Amino acid sequence: MLEREYQGQNCSIARALEIVGERWTLLIIRDAFLGLRRFDQFQQSLGIARNVLTDRLNWLVGQGILERVRYSERPIRHEYQLTPKGRDLLLPLTAFRQWGDKHLSQKPPTLMRRKSNSQPVVAALVLEGSGVLRAEQVELVPGPGATPAQELWWHDGSNDARPSRSHSGRLAHGDQDAISR
């Protein structure tokens, strides 16, 4: 992807859009939050061309949003897991979902709730330093507009944003810091 210059602007929004502002990129990140990890899962969910998906996955790995983790030796195969930097995108994605639910959908396809008590969770402006929920404390559940196609992630139990674990069960590199935030 070609980076653009924003002459005379010192804008974090413009810089963030250079990384995640392309449509497929945000949808891949959304699907990673929904528990998808493998190339074929992303392709099936999005209906995206293989070459475009390959390009976007490589871009997200290069930007430190996803990491490639080997899950098979023969043949060599990788899955894609959100990094701490990638998991920090939960808030803006939640805000986009919330805006779309309010203005574009009569029946939201997903709802976010707190795991411990199933209370609804929304993106909101809060005082810095006040208590906020961490990604591993929330989950997405079927909403009134859910479709059977979304069963893929609801039934496998991977529909939360908890840190990825390596095959040994230990937290992936750098994830301990994300939990202690």
Image (cartoon, rainbow, N blue to C red):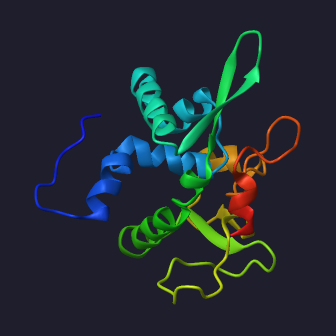
The x, y position of residue 115, in whole percent, is 77, 72
The x, y position of residue 92, in whole percent, is 46, 65
In the image, residue 96 above or below residue 2: below
* Quadrant location, the C terminus: bottom right
In the image, residue 74 above or below residue 95: above
Q: Within the image, what quadrant is residue 122 found in? A: bottom right
The x, y position of residue 73, in whole percent, is 77, 14
In the image, residue 50 above or below residue 114: above
Give the residue furthest to the top. Answer: 74
Give the residue furthest to the right. Answer: 168
The foreground one among 67 and 115 is 67
Q: Residue at x 19, y 44 (%)?
A: 4
Left or right for 71, reference 99:
right
* Quadrant location, the N terminus: top left
Q: Residue at x 77, y 49 (%)?
A: 155
Left or right for 5, reference 115:
left
Q: Residue at x 69, y 54 (%)?
A: 159
The x, y position of residue 50, in whole percent, is 45, 22
Numbered disc total: 0
